[in-house]
Amino acid sequence: MSEFQHLILDLDETLYPRRTGLMGEIGRRMLLYLTSRMGFTSDEAADIRKRFFVRYGTTLRGLQVEYQVDADDYLQFVHAVPLQDYIVPDPALEAMLARIPLPKSIFTNADALHARRVMERLGVTHHFPVVVDIHAVDFHCKPEPEAYRRLLSILGATGPACILVEDMARNLRPAREFGMTTVLVDGDQADGVDYAIRDLLELEEVLTQLTGQVTKSPLETRQTSLLGRESAVIE
């Protein structure tokens, strides 16, 4: 994979499937923070989340700009979720990551503490020595271009040397502007996205297409890995 030097993955609903429901619970706690800690009504809280997501990229960024909230207090509150109720170790994911001969990093709008808790639960922490979190990019969150600029600076990389895997097309389009190869997980092919896959375990097939290097029969990889992935998800 000589032309590529970094494989970068988003965390939530990318490293684990959307259907686990974990982000739904985190979203519920975001609303709870707005109502219980800040005094908004339920309707106001829902409106703030939608508005801040569109304008700032995340609820936290909007709260920082408009209400000067304590970021660490907010992050600790919204991520106080029993991960064991949502995700379990994922041997198929671990095996796939082990077969991919690229340095791997996490790029997330969450904080490193949450990222490491999730990775430890999945059993894949050792694959990701670098976690570029919201603190590392000074709260410039995806899809703000400055977040990607800082990501590349931290990695010491150029855009064309990177592959970014994400579950949101809007977070991939700025990456493509920087020259990164982009892969959308659990979504349909979209403008500004190079590849779209239904499950992260199909990433190995995409990398085979990109590099021409085959570590295993693509059909065999997909069948065995997806079977393992299903058994690792709590519905």
Image (spheres, rainbow, N blue to C red):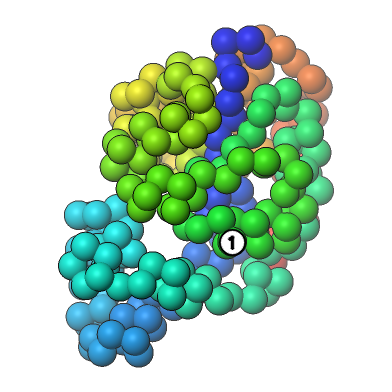
Relative height, residue 78 to residue 55 (above, below): below
The amino acid sitting under disc 1 is: Leu
> In the picture, residue 22 is in which quadrant?
bottom right
Whether residue 177 is visible here, answered yes or no, is yes
Whether residue 228 is visible here, answered yes or no, is no
Camera-side residue of 38 and 42:
38
Relative height, residue 182 to residue 3 (above, below): below
Instruction: Residue 136: give x, y in percent of width and height.
Output: 46, 47
Camera-side residue of 60 and 196:
60
Residue, x 29% and y 60% (percent of image)? 61
Relative height, residue 25 to residue 15 (above, below): below
Camera-side residue of 211 and 113:
113
Instruction: Residue 223: give x, y in percent of width and height.
Output: 76, 36
Relative height, residue 200 to residue 211 (above, below): below
Q: How many numbered circles are shown? A: 1
Dot 1 lies on which element? helix
